[in-house]
Amino acid sequence: MKKKGILLLFLVIIVAFWQVAFLQNGMKWDFVDAFLPSRYFFSESILNNQFPLWNPYLLYGTPIFADLVSVFNPEFWIVGNLFGYSNITLQYMFLVYILVAGVSFFWFLKQFDSEYKISLCLSVAYMLSGLTVGNAQHLAFVAGYALLPFVMASYFRFIRQFNRPNLAQLAISLFLMVYASYPGLTIISGYFL
């Protein structure tokens, strides 16, 4: 994908979600009630050089492995070690996942040799679709929705050519889908594969 295409997708996200991008309004409901406490605890533990075994902020305390979105998600480790989680970083992670959805759908369409402009327009439609906007409070849904085209494109590449790079790409995409996405979405995508 050309840099102009990524910039265009980024600008579309800023225009479409300007209230989130410029921090005029915050995300609501499960975004703040369920995702923020878990991720805040995780980042505070990591920044204090402790492995987060027990989350005291959620439901009178829960083990960290009982969280639906596992601590093996690479996003947790990158953001947790660099910035720490707050409402602001979580809102920007939502926007990053929307951008990933657009880029991965563009890449999926390019696997089938579609035209550049058509792929770009359909990527904008995909990343601003009703599932993204309607489930904005569920970050795991948005992450799975963003990764789904990457998984499908990796699978189709592996089916066409059995080689190690394609196998590694498929393994990475499935790893991300399992550990970053909502479990139900992972199971449903397994039906398609």
Image (tube, rainbow, N blue to C red):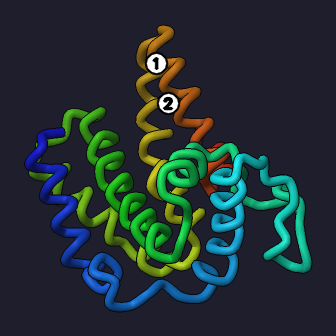
- Residue 40 is drawn in which quadrant? bottom right
User: Residue 156, percent across and down?
Assistant: 44, 29
Give the amino acid type for the residue marked by disc 2 in the picture.
Tyr
Q: Work out whether residue 110 or residue 66 is closer to the camera in this orientation and state it.
A: 66
Image side of residue 28 versus residue 93, left or right:
right
Give the amino acid type for the residue marked by disc 1 in the picture.
Asn
Which of the image's four quarters has the C terminus? top right
Provide the residue designation for mark 1.
166
Under circle 2, the secondary element is helix
At 44% from the left edge and 67% from the top edge, which residue is drawn? 94
- Residue 22 is drawn in which quadrant? bottom left
User: Residue 18, percent across and down?
Assistant: 25, 81
The reply to whether residue 184 is in sight is no
Provide the residue designation for mark 2.
155
At 29% from the left edge and 79% from the top edge, which residue is drawn? 17
Tell me if mark 2 has few (under 14), some (14-19) or many (20+) residues whose alpha carbon lies within 10 angstroms of its own: many
The image shows a total of numbered marks equal to 2
> First in sequence: mark 2 or mark 1?
2
User: Residue 132, percent across and down?
Assistant: 43, 71
The reply to whether residue 134 is in sight is yes
Q: Is residue 159 above or below residue 138?
A: above
Alpha-carbon distance for marks 2 and 1?
A: 8 Å
Image side of residue 6 versus residue 84, left or right:
left
Q: Is residue 111 above or below residue 74?
A: above
Which of the image's four quarters has the N terminus? top left
Image side of residue 56 versus residue 97, left or right:
right
At 86% from the left edge and 79% from the top edge, which residue is drawn? 59
Q: Is residue 91 above or below residue 148?
A: below
